[in-house]
Image: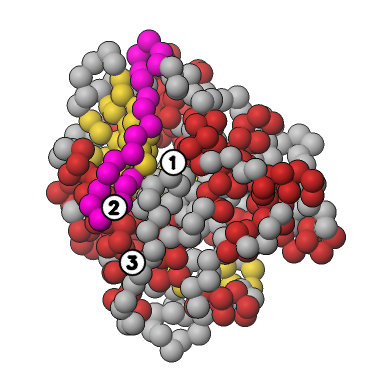
Amino acid sequence: MSKSDNSVSAAAVSSASSSRSQSDLRTGDLSDSPPPMSSKNPPPRRTFMSALASLDLPLDFKTAVSQWWHAPSLDVTEREVLSFLPFFPAPDATRKAESKMIELSKGRSLNEFEITRTTEPVEEELVVLHGYGAGLAFFYRNFDGLSQVPGWRLHALDLLGYGRSSRPKFKVKAKDKYEAVHASENWFIDSLEEWREKKGIEKFTLMAHSMGGYIGVAYALRHPERIKKLILVSPAGVPRDPWVVYEDEAHPPSSGLGSEFTSTQADTTKHSTKPADKRAMELKRPIPNWLVFLWERHVSPFSFVRYTGPLGPQLVSLWTSNRFSLLPKDEATALHNYVLGLFTARGSGEYAITRLLAPGAYARIALLDRINKLDVPTLWMYGENDWMDIKAGIKAASKMRTNGVDSKCVVIEKAGHHLYLDNPENFNAVVVDAMRKTE
Protein backbone atom coordinates (compact mmCIF):
# COMPACT_ATOMS: atom_id res chain seq x y z
CA MET A 1 0.00 0.00 0.00
CA SER A 2 1.35 3.35 -0.93
CA LYS A 3 1.50 6.54 1.07
CA SER A 4 -0.90 8.09 -1.38
CA ASP A 5 -3.46 5.55 -0.23
CA ASN A 6 -3.06 6.99 3.27
CA SER A 7 -3.17 3.40 4.50
CA VAL A 8 -1.28 1.91 7.41
CA SER A 9 0.54 -1.34 6.69
CA ALA A 10 0.54 -4.29 9.05
CA ALA A 11 4.17 -3.65 9.92
CA ALA A 12 3.44 0.00 10.62
CA VAL A 13 0.68 -0.95 13.03
CA SER A 14 2.98 -3.33 14.84
CA SER A 15 5.75 -0.73 14.97
CA ALA A 16 3.40 1.96 16.18
CA SER A 17 2.13 -0.32 18.92
CA SER A 18 5.60 -1.24 20.18
CA SER A 19 6.82 2.37 20.20
CA ARG A 20 3.96 3.79 22.24
CA SER A 21 4.83 5.65 25.42
CA GLN A 22 4.36 3.94 28.77
CA SER A 23 1.40 6.20 29.55
CA ASP A 24 -0.29 5.15 26.32
CA LEU A 25 0.30 1.52 27.21
CA ARG A 26 -1.38 2.00 30.56
CA THR A 27 -4.27 3.98 29.13
CA GLY A 28 -4.85 1.53 26.27
CA ASP A 29 -4.42 -1.44 28.65
CA LEU A 30 -2.02 -3.01 26.18
CA SER A 31 0.23 -4.17 29.00
CA ASP A 32 -2.66 -6.23 30.36
CA SER A 33 -3.91 -7.49 26.99
CA PRO A 34 -4.39 -11.24 26.50
CA PRO A 35 -1.10 -13.03 25.82
CA PRO A 36 -0.06 -13.29 22.17
CA MET A 37 -1.15 -16.49 20.52
CA SER A 38 1.37 -19.08 19.45
CA SER A 39 1.13 -20.94 16.18
CA LYS A 40 3.55 -23.68 17.30
CA ASN A 41 2.10 -27.13 16.81
CA PRO A 42 -1.33 -25.83 15.79
CA PRO A 43 -4.17 -28.36 15.74
CA PRO A 44 -4.77 -30.01 12.36
CA ARG A 45 -7.11 -28.17 10.00
CA ARG A 46 -10.56 -29.66 9.56
CA THR A 47 -12.66 -28.76 6.58
CA PHE A 48 -16.41 -29.16 6.71
CA MET A 49 -16.76 -31.71 3.92
CA SER A 50 -13.63 -33.73 4.73
CA ALA A 51 -14.60 -34.04 8.38
CA LEU A 52 -18.10 -35.18 7.51
CA ALA A 53 -16.79 -37.61 4.93
CA SER A 54 -14.38 -39.20 7.40
CA LEU A 55 -16.58 -38.61 10.46
CA ASP A 56 -13.52 -36.94 11.96
CA LEU A 57 -15.63 -34.64 14.10
CA PRO A 58 -13.91 -32.78 16.95
CA LEU A 59 -16.86 -33.37 19.30
CA ASP A 60 -17.62 -36.98 20.23
CA PHE A 61 -21.19 -38.22 19.79
CA LYS A 62 -21.90 -38.70 23.50
CA THR A 63 -20.92 -35.12 24.30
CA ALA A 64 -22.89 -33.89 21.28
CA VAL A 65 -26.03 -35.64 22.51
CA SER A 66 -25.56 -34.07 25.93
CA GLN A 67 -25.10 -30.58 24.45
CA TRP A 68 -28.13 -31.05 22.20
CA TRP A 69 -30.39 -32.32 24.99
CA HIS A 70 -29.15 -30.15 27.84
CA ALA A 71 -28.03 -27.02 25.99
CA PRO A 72 -27.53 -24.10 28.43
CA SER A 73 -29.47 -20.90 27.78
CA LEU A 74 -27.91 -18.02 25.86
CA ASP A 75 -27.90 -15.77 28.90
CA VAL A 76 -25.82 -18.37 30.76
CA THR A 77 -23.32 -18.90 27.93
CA GLU A 78 -23.03 -15.16 27.23
CA ARG A 79 -22.35 -14.48 30.90
CA GLU A 80 -19.73 -17.25 30.94
CA VAL A 81 -17.79 -15.57 28.11
CA LEU A 82 -18.13 -12.05 29.54
CA SER A 83 -16.98 -13.28 32.95
CA PHE A 84 -13.42 -13.44 31.61
CA LEU A 85 -13.45 -9.64 31.96
CA PRO A 86 -11.85 -8.24 35.15
CA PHE A 87 -14.83 -5.96 35.86
CA PHE A 88 -17.76 -8.33 35.29
CA PRO A 89 -19.87 -9.40 37.02
CA ALA A 90 -18.18 -7.54 39.89
CA PRO A 91 -16.84 -4.02 39.09
CA ASP A 92 -13.20 -3.05 39.45
CA ALA A 93 -11.76 0.24 40.72
CA THR A 94 -12.64 2.21 37.58
CA ARG A 95 -15.35 0.36 35.64
CA LYS A 96 -18.67 -1.36 36.01
CA ALA A 97 -20.59 -3.42 33.46
CA GLU A 98 -24.26 -4.29 33.18
CA SER A 99 -26.22 -6.62 30.95
CA LYS A 100 -29.48 -4.91 29.98
CA MET A 101 -32.54 -5.65 27.88
CA ILE A 102 -33.79 -2.42 26.27
CA GLU A 103 -37.49 -2.66 25.47
CA LEU A 104 -38.62 -1.29 22.10
CA SER A 105 -41.99 -0.97 20.42
CA LYS A 106 -43.99 -3.91 18.98
CA GLY A 107 -42.72 -6.26 21.67
CA ARG A 108 -39.14 -6.07 20.44
CA SER A 109 -36.02 -5.62 22.56
CA LEU A 110 -32.26 -5.23 22.12
CA ASN A 111 -29.73 -6.94 24.36
CA GLU A 112 -27.04 -4.53 25.55
CA PHE A 113 -23.78 -4.91 27.45
CA GLU A 114 -22.92 -1.47 28.86
CA ILE A 115 -19.52 -0.60 30.31
CA THR A 116 -19.25 2.65 32.28
CA ARG A 117 -16.17 4.26 33.76
CA THR A 118 -16.85 5.32 37.33
CA THR A 119 -13.98 7.77 37.81
CA GLU A 120 -15.09 10.60 35.49
CA PRO A 121 -18.19 11.92 33.70
CA VAL A 122 -19.29 10.33 30.41
CA GLU A 123 -18.30 12.50 27.45
CA GLU A 124 -18.30 10.06 24.51
CA GLU A 125 -20.28 6.97 23.53
CA LEU A 126 -18.98 3.93 21.61
CA VAL A 127 -21.56 1.54 20.14
CA VAL A 128 -20.31 -1.90 19.07
CA LEU A 129 -22.10 -4.19 16.58
CA HIS A 130 -21.22 -7.80 15.79
CA GLY A 131 -21.27 -9.64 12.47
CA TYR A 132 -23.50 -12.29 10.87
CA GLY A 133 -24.42 -15.18 13.16
CA ALA A 134 -22.39 -13.72 16.03
CA GLY A 135 -23.20 -11.87 19.25
CA LEU A 136 -21.86 -9.06 21.43
CA ALA A 137 -19.70 -11.38 23.55
CA PHE A 138 -17.41 -12.02 20.57
CA PHE A 139 -15.66 -8.76 21.57
CA TYR A 140 -14.79 -10.01 25.06
CA ARG A 141 -11.06 -9.62 24.32
CA ASN A 142 -11.52 -5.96 23.38
CA PHE A 143 -13.80 -4.59 26.09
CA ASP A 144 -11.02 -4.36 28.68
CA GLY A 145 -8.67 -2.32 26.51
CA LEU A 146 -11.31 -0.09 24.93
CA SER A 147 -12.92 0.76 28.27
CA GLN A 148 -9.63 2.17 29.56
CA VAL A 149 -10.10 5.42 27.62
CA PRO A 150 -11.23 8.18 30.04
CA GLY A 151 -14.64 9.72 29.41
CA TRP A 152 -15.95 6.93 27.17
CA ARG A 153 -18.94 4.64 27.78
CA LEU A 154 -19.31 1.45 25.72
CA HIS A 155 -22.53 -0.11 24.46
CA ALA A 156 -22.21 -3.55 22.84
CA LEU A 157 -25.47 -4.63 21.22
CA ASP A 158 -26.99 -7.78 19.81
CA LEU A 159 -28.64 -6.74 16.56
CA LEU A 160 -32.37 -7.34 16.28
CA GLY A 161 -32.92 -11.02 15.55
CA TYR A 162 -29.50 -12.05 16.89
CA GLY A 163 -28.01 -13.12 20.21
CA ARG A 164 -30.29 -12.45 23.16
CA SER A 165 -32.20 -9.65 21.43
CA SER A 166 -35.78 -10.47 20.49
CA ARG A 167 -36.15 -12.65 17.43
CA PRO A 168 -39.31 -11.61 15.58
CA LYS A 169 -40.22 -13.34 12.35
CA PHE A 170 -38.26 -11.75 9.51
CA LYS A 171 -40.65 -10.49 6.84
CA VAL A 172 -39.87 -8.59 3.66
CA LYS A 173 -42.80 -8.17 1.30
CA ALA A 174 -40.89 -6.38 -1.47
CA LYS A 175 -40.46 -8.50 -4.60
CA ASP A 176 -37.99 -6.23 -6.37
CA LYS A 177 -34.52 -7.15 -5.12
CA TYR A 178 -33.45 -3.52 -4.62
CA GLU A 179 -36.60 -2.75 -2.63
CA ALA A 180 -35.88 -5.90 -0.61
CA VAL A 181 -32.38 -4.58 0.16
CA HIS A 182 -33.70 -1.33 1.61
CA ALA A 183 -36.53 -3.06 3.48
CA SER A 184 -34.03 -5.48 5.05
CA GLU A 185 -31.69 -2.64 6.02
CA ASN A 186 -34.57 -0.73 7.60
CA TRP A 187 -35.43 -3.77 9.72
CA PHE A 188 -32.13 -3.25 11.56
CA ILE A 189 -31.81 0.53 11.24
CA ASP A 190 -35.20 1.28 12.78
CA SER A 191 -34.50 -0.85 15.87
CA LEU A 192 -31.05 0.71 16.33
CA GLU A 193 -32.48 4.22 16.04
CA GLU A 194 -35.25 3.42 18.53
CA TRP A 195 -32.61 2.05 20.92
CA ARG A 196 -30.66 5.33 20.60
CA GLU A 197 -33.79 7.34 21.38
CA LYS A 198 -34.56 5.16 24.41
CA LYS A 199 -31.02 5.67 25.72
CA GLY A 200 -31.11 9.44 25.14
CA ILE A 201 -27.83 9.42 23.19
CA GLU A 202 -27.45 12.34 20.78
CA LYS A 203 -24.32 11.26 18.88
CA PHE A 204 -21.99 8.29 19.07
CA THR A 205 -19.02 6.55 17.48
CA LEU A 206 -20.04 3.28 15.83
CA MET A 207 -17.68 0.30 15.59
CA ALA A 208 -19.10 -2.61 13.63
CA HIS A 209 -17.78 -5.89 12.24
CA SER A 210 -18.57 -7.65 8.95
CA MET A 211 -22.36 -7.71 8.41
CA GLY A 212 -22.67 -5.25 11.29
CA GLY A 213 -20.35 -2.93 9.35
CA TYR A 214 -22.69 -3.03 6.37
CA ILE A 215 -25.63 -2.18 8.65
CA GLY A 216 -23.54 0.56 10.28
CA VAL A 217 -22.97 2.28 6.92
CA ALA A 218 -26.67 1.97 6.08
CA TYR A 219 -27.53 3.56 9.45
CA ALA A 220 -25.02 6.39 8.93
CA LEU A 221 -26.46 7.13 5.48
CA ARG A 222 -29.94 7.39 7.00
CA HIS A 223 -28.94 9.21 10.22
CA PRO A 224 -25.62 10.99 9.56
CA GLU A 225 -26.38 13.57 12.24
CA ARG A 226 -26.13 10.83 14.89
CA ILE A 227 -22.69 9.49 13.98
CA LYS A 228 -19.42 11.10 15.07
CA LYS A 229 -17.17 8.45 13.54
CA LEU A 230 -17.44 5.05 11.86
CA ILE A 231 -14.98 2.25 12.62
CA LEU A 232 -15.68 -0.47 10.07
CA VAL A 233 -14.02 -3.77 10.95
CA SER A 234 -13.70 -5.99 7.86
CA PRO A 235 -17.12 -4.80 6.67
CA ALA A 236 -19.24 -6.90 4.31
CA GLY A 237 -20.57 -5.64 1.02
CA VAL A 238 -17.90 -3.09 0.07
CA PRO A 239 -16.71 -4.12 -3.43
CA ARG A 240 -18.79 -4.10 -6.57
CA ASP A 241 -19.74 -7.49 -7.88
CA PRO A 242 -19.77 -7.31 -11.69
CA TRP A 243 -21.74 -10.55 -11.90
CA VAL A 244 -24.88 -9.47 -10.03
CA VAL A 245 -25.36 -5.81 -10.86
CA TYR A 246 -28.51 -6.86 -12.64
CA GLU A 247 -30.94 -9.63 -11.81
CA ASP A 248 -30.41 -11.61 -15.01
CA GLU A 249 -26.62 -11.72 -14.77
CA ALA A 250 -24.74 -14.78 -13.56
CA HIS A 251 -23.48 -15.16 -10.00
CA PRO A 252 -19.76 -14.79 -9.23
CA PRO A 253 -17.79 -17.93 -10.04
CA SER A 254 -15.69 -17.76 -6.88
CA SER A 255 -15.52 -16.23 -3.41
CA GLY A 256 -13.32 -16.20 -0.32
CA LEU A 257 -16.30 -16.88 1.96
CA GLY A 258 -15.45 -20.55 2.27
CA SER A 259 -12.23 -19.77 4.13
CA GLU A 260 -14.36 -18.53 7.03
CA PHE A 261 -15.20 -22.19 7.64
CA THR A 262 -11.96 -23.90 6.58
CA SER A 263 -9.18 -21.67 7.96
CA THR A 264 -7.86 -22.28 11.44
CA GLN A 265 -6.83 -19.51 13.79
CA ALA A 266 -3.24 -20.63 13.21
CA ASP A 267 -3.77 -19.83 9.51
CA THR A 268 -5.19 -16.36 10.10
CA THR A 269 -2.57 -15.32 12.67
CA LYS A 270 0.43 -16.03 10.45
CA HIS A 271 2.38 -13.13 8.99
CA SER A 272 2.61 -13.16 5.21
CA THR A 273 4.88 -11.26 2.83
CA LYS A 274 2.49 -11.70 -0.09
CA PRO A 275 0.48 -8.69 -1.30
CA ALA A 276 -3.05 -8.49 0.11
CA ASP A 277 -4.71 -8.92 -3.28
CA LYS A 278 -2.70 -12.09 -4.00
CA ARG A 279 -3.60 -13.59 -0.63
CA ALA A 280 -7.26 -12.77 -1.24
CA MET A 281 -7.16 -14.49 -4.64
CA GLU A 282 -5.66 -17.61 -3.06
CA LEU A 283 -8.62 -17.81 -0.68
CA LYS A 284 -11.21 -17.72 -3.46
CA ARG A 285 -12.98 -20.98 -4.26
CA PRO A 286 -15.74 -21.84 -6.76
CA ILE A 287 -19.27 -21.35 -5.43
CA PRO A 288 -21.16 -24.65 -5.75
CA ASN A 289 -24.50 -24.61 -7.55
CA TRP A 290 -26.29 -26.13 -4.58
CA LEU A 291 -25.22 -23.18 -2.41
CA VAL A 292 -26.51 -20.69 -4.98
CA PHE A 293 -29.79 -22.64 -5.14
CA LEU A 294 -30.31 -22.57 -1.35
CA TRP A 295 -29.11 -18.97 -1.03
CA GLU A 296 -31.58 -17.60 -3.55
CA ARG A 297 -34.37 -19.46 -1.76
CA HIS A 298 -33.37 -17.80 1.53
CA VAL A 299 -32.43 -21.03 3.30
CA SER A 300 -30.50 -20.24 6.47
CA PRO A 301 -27.21 -22.14 6.97
CA PHE A 302 -28.12 -22.45 10.65
CA SER A 303 -31.09 -24.65 9.71
CA PHE A 304 -28.64 -27.52 9.31
CA VAL A 305 -27.56 -27.04 12.92
CA ARG A 306 -31.11 -26.67 14.28
CA TYR A 307 -32.68 -29.65 12.55
CA THR A 308 -30.00 -32.33 12.63
CA GLY A 309 -30.32 -33.32 16.29
CA PRO A 310 -27.05 -34.32 18.01
CA LEU A 311 -25.20 -33.73 14.76
CA GLY A 312 -25.86 -29.99 15.28
CA PRO A 313 -23.30 -29.52 18.09
CA GLN A 314 -20.81 -31.55 16.06
CA LEU A 315 -21.29 -29.29 13.04
CA VAL A 316 -20.76 -26.26 15.28
CA SER A 317 -17.59 -27.82 16.70
CA LEU A 318 -16.14 -28.03 13.18
CA TRP A 319 -16.18 -24.22 13.03
CA THR A 320 -15.33 -23.44 16.66
CA SER A 321 -12.41 -25.91 16.78
CA ASN A 322 -10.89 -24.07 13.81
CA ARG A 323 -11.88 -20.51 14.67
CA PHE A 324 -10.77 -20.62 18.34
CA SER A 325 -7.92 -23.11 17.96
CA LEU A 326 -5.27 -20.89 19.62
CA LEU A 327 -7.35 -19.63 22.52
CA PRO A 328 -6.93 -21.00 26.05
CA LYS A 329 -9.05 -24.11 26.51
CA ASP A 330 -11.50 -22.55 28.97
CA GLU A 331 -12.14 -19.60 26.66
CA ALA A 332 -12.51 -21.82 23.59
CA THR A 333 -14.98 -24.06 25.42
CA ALA A 334 -17.02 -21.08 26.64
CA LEU A 335 -17.13 -19.66 23.11
CA HIS A 336 -18.20 -23.02 21.65
CA ASN A 337 -21.13 -23.17 24.07
CA TYR A 338 -22.01 -19.56 23.28
CA VAL A 339 -21.86 -20.13 19.51
CA LEU A 340 -23.97 -23.28 19.82
CA GLY A 341 -26.63 -21.21 21.56
CA LEU A 342 -26.44 -18.50 18.90
CA PHE A 343 -26.72 -20.96 16.01
CA THR A 344 -29.58 -22.99 17.46
CA ALA A 345 -31.78 -20.10 18.65
CA ARG A 346 -34.90 -19.27 16.69
CA GLY A 347 -34.11 -18.00 13.19
CA SER A 348 -34.78 -14.31 12.65
CA GLY A 349 -32.33 -11.60 11.58
CA GLU A 350 -30.13 -14.16 9.83
CA TYR A 351 -32.64 -14.34 6.96
CA ALA A 352 -31.75 -10.79 5.93
CA ILE A 353 -28.36 -11.81 4.56
CA THR A 354 -29.70 -13.36 1.36
CA ARG A 355 -31.61 -10.14 0.63
CA LEU A 356 -28.62 -7.91 1.30
CA LEU A 357 -25.87 -10.05 -0.20
CA ALA A 358 -25.60 -12.25 -3.27
CA PRO A 359 -24.00 -15.72 -3.10
CA GLY A 360 -20.34 -15.29 -2.25
CA ALA A 361 -21.06 -12.43 0.18
CA TYR A 362 -21.05 -9.62 -2.40
CA ALA A 363 -23.54 -6.85 -1.68
CA ARG A 364 -26.49 -6.58 -4.02
CA ILE A 365 -25.91 -2.81 -3.77
CA ALA A 366 -22.20 -2.29 -3.12
CA LEU A 367 -21.13 0.18 -0.45
CA LEU A 368 -18.56 1.55 -2.90
CA ASP A 369 -21.48 2.91 -4.91
CA ARG A 370 -23.10 4.50 -1.86
CA ILE A 371 -20.29 6.19 0.07
CA ASN A 372 -20.42 9.32 -2.09
CA LYS A 373 -23.25 10.33 0.22
CA LEU A 374 -21.39 9.33 3.39
CA ASP A 375 -20.07 12.45 5.14
CA VAL A 376 -18.79 10.82 8.34
CA PRO A 377 -15.12 10.30 9.37
CA THR A 378 -14.48 6.61 8.71
CA LEU A 379 -11.76 4.15 9.67
CA TRP A 380 -11.64 0.94 7.61
CA MET A 381 -9.89 -2.01 9.30
CA TYR A 382 -8.88 -5.41 7.93
CA GLY A 383 -6.70 -8.36 8.91
CA GLU A 384 -3.74 -9.11 6.68
CA ASN A 385 -5.16 -12.62 6.08
CA ASP A 386 -8.71 -11.35 5.67
CA TRP A 387 -10.98 -13.06 3.15
CA MET A 388 -12.80 -9.77 2.70
CA ASP A 389 -11.53 -7.52 -0.12
CA ILE A 390 -8.88 -5.28 1.48
CA LYS A 391 -8.30 -3.41 -1.79
CA ALA A 392 -11.97 -2.41 -1.79
CA GLY A 393 -11.51 -0.86 1.66
CA ILE A 394 -8.46 1.06 0.50
CA LYS A 395 -10.39 2.26 -2.54
CA ALA A 396 -13.36 3.29 -0.38
CA ALA A 397 -11.12 5.30 1.97
CA SER A 398 -9.45 7.01 -1.00
CA LYS A 399 -12.81 7.79 -2.56
CA MET A 400 -14.04 9.38 0.66
CA ARG A 401 -10.90 11.50 0.98
CA THR A 402 -11.43 12.71 -2.58
CA ASN A 403 -14.85 13.87 -1.43
CA GLY A 404 -13.26 15.79 1.46
CA VAL A 405 -14.13 13.27 4.18
CA ASP A 406 -11.54 12.10 6.73
CA SER A 407 -10.98 8.40 6.01
CA LYS A 408 -8.17 5.85 6.06
CA CYS A 409 -7.62 2.09 5.88
CA VAL A 410 -5.57 0.12 8.42
CA VAL A 411 -4.40 -3.47 8.04
CA ILE A 412 -3.68 -5.44 11.21
CA GLU A 413 -0.91 -8.01 10.90
CA LYS A 414 -1.27 -11.63 12.00
CA ALA A 415 -5.04 -11.49 11.78
CA GLY A 416 -7.88 -12.55 9.52
CA HIS A 417 -11.54 -11.62 9.21
CA HIS A 418 -11.97 -11.75 13.01
CA LEU A 419 -9.04 -9.39 13.57
CA TYR A 420 -10.42 -8.18 16.91
CA LEU A 421 -10.03 -11.75 18.19
CA ASP A 422 -6.89 -12.83 16.30
CA ASN A 423 -4.74 -9.85 17.34
CA PRO A 424 -6.61 -7.96 20.07
CA GLU A 425 -3.54 -6.01 21.23
CA ASN A 426 -2.89 -4.30 17.88
CA PHE A 427 -6.58 -4.03 17.12
CA ASN A 428 -7.29 -2.28 20.42
CA ALA A 429 -4.34 0.07 19.91
CA VAL A 430 -5.71 1.31 16.58
CA VAL A 431 -9.27 1.69 17.88
CA VAL A 432 -8.13 3.49 21.05
CA ASP A 433 -6.15 5.90 18.88
CA ALA A 434 -9.27 6.56 16.79
CA MET A 435 -11.32 7.11 19.95
CA ARG A 436 -8.83 9.65 21.30
CA LYS A 437 -8.97 11.57 18.02
CA THR A 438 -12.78 11.76 17.97
CA GLU A 439 -14.08 15.32 18.11
Numbered badge on residue 95: none
Name the residue at the front extreme: 69
Q: Which residue is mark 3?
A: 184
Q: Residue 293 occupies which quadrant of the picture?
A: bottom right
- Lower sequence index among marks 3 and 1: 1
Quarter of the rendering occupied by the C terminus: top left
In the image, what residue occupies the spot 50% across and 78% down? 297
Q: CA distance from mark 2 to mark 3?
A: 19 Å
What kind of residue is marked 1?
Answer: Leu
Front-most of 364 and 436?
364
Q: Is residue 100 magenta?
A: yes
Task: Report the magenta residues as a range.
Answer: 91-110
What amino acid is at disc 2? Gly
Give me the residue at 33% from left, 39% from top: 101
Q: Residue at x 37, y 42 (%)?
A: 111
* Helix, strand or loop under label 2: helix
Q: Position of residue 349 (x, y in %)?
A: 41, 59
Residue 203 appears left or right of 103 = left
Distance from disc 2 to disc 1, alpha carbons, whole Å, reads: 21 Å
Mark 1, other Cα within 10 Å: few <14 / some 14–19 / many ≥20: many
Q: Which residue is mark 2?
A: 107
Dot label at residue 136: 1
Q: Sequence-wise, which precedes: disc 2 or disc 3?
A: 2
Q: Position of residue 378 (x, y in %)?
A: 30, 47
Amino acid type at circle 3 is Ser
Is 83 part of what is drawn in magenta?
no
Q: Nearer the viewer, mark 2 or mark 1?
A: 2
Within 10 Å of disc 3 (Cα), the crowding (few <14, some 14-19, many 20+) is: many
Q: Are marks 3 and 1 in contact (CB under 8 Å)?
A: no
Q: Nearer the viewer, residue 53 or 73?
A: 73
